[in-house]
Amino acid sequence: MFHVVIPARFAAARLPGKPLLDIGGRPLLQWVWQRARDSGAASVIVATDDERIRAAALQFGADVAMTSAHHASGTDRIAEVAATKNWSADDIVVNVQGDEPMMPSAVIAQVAAGLTSAHVNIATAAAPVQGLHEYLDPNCVKVVCARDGRALYFSRAPLPWHRDGAAGEHPAGAPGAGAPGAGAGAPGAQRWPTHFEGALRHIGIYAYRVGSLRQFAAWPPSRLESAEKLEQLRALENGMHIQVVALAEAPAAGVDTPQDLERVRALLAP
């Protein structure tokens, strides 16, 4: 049994009011909520500090928790919900971002199932990096794992870096380094695939044991977290076990920009 909490806020620099933007005649948030409902969760709660989001969520039938307006992250907002609901330390709660209308219900359930062992504090997901553009993109977070799926490190940098497969004197992406568009005979043209072969792209969905969530929310931001701007590094620096669920492919990306919104509208058009 697991719970899903969907943190949703109105303010967004690139898309103000994002949870309420229309997709196929429904608010974006309703698509996320329905995916979570279809995952088999015992409960699905929208966590917000905005009355407009609360009113819209209640209209389409969601359970809503009003939370503080001063949370630094969605994780903190979820921790408040867990405390308010008085969930036990062993209960499982999944953080499904409020801008992920394409997140498969099966993935939500898979990540929750990643907490099958008592020693696992957090579960998340990853999928194979699909190409050089993803591998070098700092917005595509990479993760490396132990053989048993335990996360060793997350980074915005290319990870792992195949030293012996590097393009010699050519810097990453330089002409002739096997970058996209380089001819078959260009120096290093066949070397680049070895850089991202086996690399994993992190998918931003998390399942927590409530006891671990409480600990995590109580810790201050860590050194590596501050450097990489990746919240999950706080858990690793404090010794938590993060289990990575392997997916065959990454779910469709969420909505961050107006271009993303139009892409998702096209995919979900009635």
Image: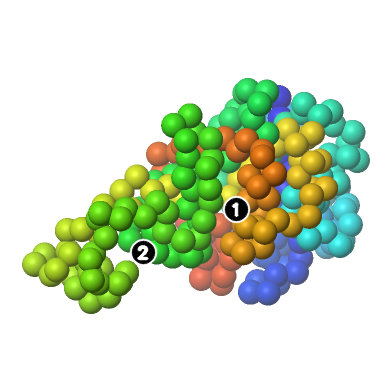
Residue 156 or residue 239, whichever sits in front: 239
Discs 1, 2 touching: Cβ within 8 Å: no
Judge from the rendering whether residue 179 lies leftward or rightward of residue 90; answer left or right: left
> Badge 1: how crowded within 10 Å, few (<14), some, or many (20+)?
many
Mark 1: which amino acid?
Glu
First in sequence: mark 1 vs mark 2: 1
> Badge 2: how crowded within 10 Å, few (<14), some, or many (20+)?
some
Judge from the rendering whether residue 124 lies leftward or rightward of residue 193; answer left or right: right
Instruction: Give the answer, above or below, for where 220 lies relative to 213.
Output: below
- Which residue does the image show at 62% across and 64% down from the upper left? 227
- Which residue does the image show at 23% across and 71% down from the upper left? 169
Find residue 212 and report its image quarter.
top right
Mark 2 = which residue? 133
- x%, y% of residue 10? 76, 65
- x%, y% of residue 85? 88, 36
Instruction: Give the answer, above or below, for where 76 lies relative to 152.
Output: below
Mark 2: which amino acid?
His
- x%, y% of residue 112? 63, 32
Q: CA distance from mark 1 to mark 2?
A: 22 Å
Q: Is residue 151 visible?
A: yes
Between circles 1 and 2, the one closer to the viewer is 2
Mark 1 = which residue? 100
Instruction: Give the answer, above or below, for where 79 lies relative to 270.
Output: above
